[in-house]
Image: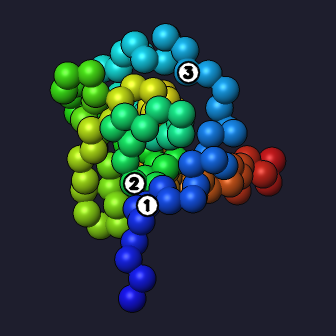
Amino acid sequence: MKRSKGKLCGKTRTMARGIKVITVNQHFKTFEPGESVLLKFKPKDMLKYPHARFNKKHGVIVNKQGNAYKVKLKDGNKIKYLDITPIHLERSVSKAPKTKTAKVKTEPKTKPKSEAIK
């Protein structure tokens, strides 16, 4: 069996073409605990770069650890915690679960027979 050369072997050249510059503002983004975020990885910065399977997943900020944030997300049926720098995080609109509303049947308004005869 051929030995693995790592998860990014042969991909770094194509990954580097996607984003031109990482700005200072992206390094210092702040998030509050409980805020919903989207994990969108920037290949130019490999610091705290998680596995590619978590790219474009939604998660929730748990707390801040050093320069990174601890993000809680669900991978299948298992809850996982990842430490990710703010460069790879974007704010996302919280998707509230859709609830089915019960339809109430209303009876049609009809005139009583006594009024209809008159």
Q: Give the secondary structure at mark 3.
A: loop
Mark 2 or mark 3, which has the lower sequence index? 3
Q: Nearer the viewer, residue 105 or 116?
A: 105
Tag of residue 51: 2
- Left or right position of 47 against 79: right
Neighbor class of circle 3 (other Cα within 10 Å; few <14, some 14-19, many 20+) is: few
Q: Is residue 106 above or below residue 64?
A: below
**What residue is drawn where x is 19% and y is 26%?**
65
Q: Nearer the viewer, residue 20 or 40?
A: 20
Q: Quadrant of the N terminus?
A: bottom left
Question: Where's residue 67, x and y in %?
Answer: 27, 21
Mark 2 or mark 1, which has the lower sequence index? 1
Question: Where's residue 99, x and y in %?
Answer: 46, 52
Mark 3 or mark 1, which has the lower sequence index? 1
Q: Determine the image quadrant of residue 84.
A: top left
* Colour basis: rainbow
Question: Where's residue 51, x and y in %?
Answer: 39, 54
Q: For the residues labelled 2 and 1, say whether their Cβ atoms are less than 8 Å apart.
A: yes
| Amino acid type, residue under disc 1 in the picture | Lys
Q: Determine the image quadrant of residue 69.
A: top left
- Alpha carbon of mark 2 to alpha carbon of mark 3: how far? 20 Å
Question: Where's residue 10, x and y in %?
Answer: 57, 59
Q: For the residues labelled 3 and 1, say whether their Cβ atoms are less than 8 Å apart.
A: no
Q: Give the secondary structure at mark 2.
A: loop
| Amino acid type, residue under disc 3 in the picture | Ile
Tag of residue 22: 3
Tag of residue 7: 1
Q: Is residue 90 above or below residue 71?
A: above
- Alpha carbon of mark 2 to alpha carbon of mark 1: how far? 8 Å
Q: Give the secondary structure at mark 1.
A: loop
Residue lying at the far bottom in this picture: please name it.
1
